[in-house]
Image (spheres, grey):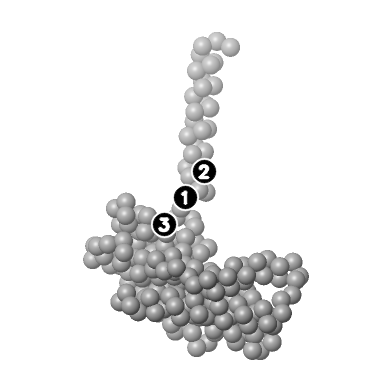
Amino acid sequence: MNKKSFSVLSLLIIAVLMAAIPAVYAKTSPGDITDKPDKNMAKAHESFVKGDINKAAEYIHKAAAYVKKEADKVSQDTKEGVKKAGDDLDKLGQGVKKGTVKSGDELKITFARVDHELAKAWYKTADEAKKSGKDASPALKKAGEELEGAAKWSGTQLTEGARASVEAVKKAGKGVAKGAKTSGEEVDKWIKGVGEGIEDVGRKLQEGR
């Protein structure tokens, strides 16, 4: 292979690699994470701390859109609270973009309240499912996940009972997916533990107002 041919081949290889970079970035960009609100909240907080205000606002609005969709899935009398939580996120995103939000702690407390509202909604949904004879574990699992998020953002340590219930529901969710069944007594225990955790975090959030 002469020098001229080698140079042409090298240029072609470089061109192909440069063309592939944007595609790879597009697949791995954090902005594509939209399946869970807490992932976008975490990215929002990270961007805010780094000073990337526009990106932080973008992630917050993505989280808000997800939360509002959740309102269609929860118990009827909890829908308004979830919709309001989504609206609160949108207001936070607007405040971040305008520069009126000055501290990452302001993001954390709003995120904690949003997760707490979702936890309450899914908890009520699980309780209603159980009372109607349906499987309450999927809704209870989501309540537990949101409770964990609320505790994390607010810096609250879950009680031993709440933590045990959240972990048990996670394991049960995997079992149910494989066809396993849980007893009514177990579900009652988990509902009680998650409910106590929601109340405890709620008190901490009230104290922090």
Evaluate whether residue 74 shows in this view.
no
At label 1, the amino acid type is Ser
At label 3, the amino acid type is Lys
- Mark found first going from the N terminus, 3 or 1: 1
The residue lying furthest to the top in this view is 2
Of the pair 43 and 186, the residue shown nearer to us:
186
Position of 136 compared to 90: left or right? right
Q: Which residue is mark 3?
A: 43
Position of 99 compared to 35: left or right? left
Residue 155, quarter of the rendered image: bottom left
Residue 30: x and y in percent read 46, 53
Say if 64 sits above or below 121 in the image.
above
Of the pair 191 and 158, the residue shown nearer to us:
158
Residue drawn at point x = 51 percent, y = 33 percent: 17
Q: Nearer the viewer, mark 2 or mark 3?
A: 3
Q: Secondary structure at mark 3?
A: helix
Q: Which residue is mark 1?
A: 29
Q: Report, in whole angstroms, how far the alpha carbon at label 2 lies from the one at label 3.
A: 19 Å
Label 1 neighbourhood size at 10 Å, few (<14), some (14-19), many (20+)? few
Q: Quadrant of the N terminus?
A: top right
Residue drawn at point x = 41 percent, y = 69 percent: 156
Q: Nearer the viewer, mark 3 or mark 1?
A: 3
